[in-house]
Image (tube, grey):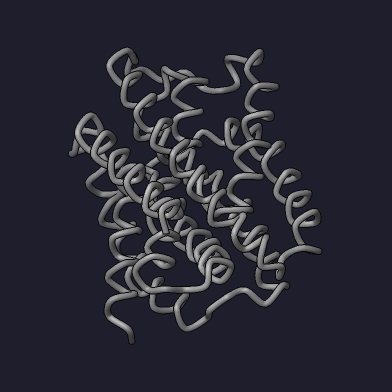
Amino acid sequence: MHWSYALSGLLGGFLVGLTGVGGGSLMTPLLILVFKINPLSAVGTDLLYAAITKLSGTLIHHRKKNIDWHAVTYLSLGSIPASLITLSLAGSRWHQESFRGAIRYSLALALFLTALALLWGWRNLYRREDTIKLAKEIPYKRPISIVIGMIIGSLVTLSSVGAGAVGTTALLLLYPKLPLSKIIGTDIAHAIPITLIAGMGHLALGEINFSLLVNLLIGSIPGIWLGTQLNSKISEKITRPLLAILLAGIAFKLVLN
């Protein structure tokens, strides 16, 4: 077992369980910049790692009744087709050097957008009422949910980033009266199908490092369990701005390198 990979998986899983963010936005640049993994392999491996990690997190959140399945459905109606379309369009150019560079820059852009989304969501934390209002009670937001799902699906498929921070922020804006624990659980559940579909697409194209995947999962599964247990005890008003600053710094490093 490669302990540095396992510890990275532990950190990523913990952050996902705690905030809904960190699977792709931290792990993919970490694999590229620190462990020098090929960008395509890093994105593909991280997608499958995120799908399996978030499946275990979803089971925990489901038992705690922290998932609004209506919101998951509406987002998925946009994100799943968008992921499939993005894979089909990208597949023919996957191994071109110019496309590999495009992935690096799209990852940097996704990280910048994620940092902005985190700060926007952090700003809205001060305005929210902590009362439950299910997605089915606001039908006029279904089309918007589908459109946002399409954006998330495309972004995640290309860069493995977006399912967490962008999804969480979208839920905060669309359904501001959902409790924060339910926002996080719903976002984690929605991320499973798009990360799995995108990850399988990368697998078909031969861009998965299975040894790396296993080592990441050794750390991430206990990590997401621990983060889920603590997510109601640590204020996101503290964690979100710190994570946003970190992601923006990583994005700058990706561009400069």
Q: Is residue 74 above or below residue 8?
A: above
Q: Is 93 on the left-hand or right-hand side of 159?
A: right
| Residue at 46 percent of width and 73 percent of height | 37
Q: Is residue 155 above or below residue 53?
A: above
| Residue 120 lies in quadrant | top left
| Residue at 50 percent of width and 49 percent of height | 161
Q: Nearer the viewer, residue 211 or 107?
A: 107
Q: Is 159 on the left-hand or right-hand side of 30?
A: right
Give x and y (percent) for residue 54.
46, 55
Give x and y (percent) for residue 1.
33, 87
Q: Quadrant of the C terminus?
A: bottom left
Give x and y (percent) for residue 58.
46, 51
| Residue at 58 percent of width and 49 percent of height | 156
Q: Is 121 on the left-hand or right-hand side of 38?
A: left
| Residue 116 lies in quadrant | top left
Q: Is residue 229 above or below residue 67?
A: below
Q: Residue furthest bottom?
A: 1
The number of callouts visible is: 0
Give x and y (percent) for residue 183.
42, 33
| Residue at 28 percent of width and 35 percent of height | 240
Q: Nearer the viewer, residue 230 or 4?
A: 4
Q: Is 128 on the left-hand or right-hand side of 158?
A: left
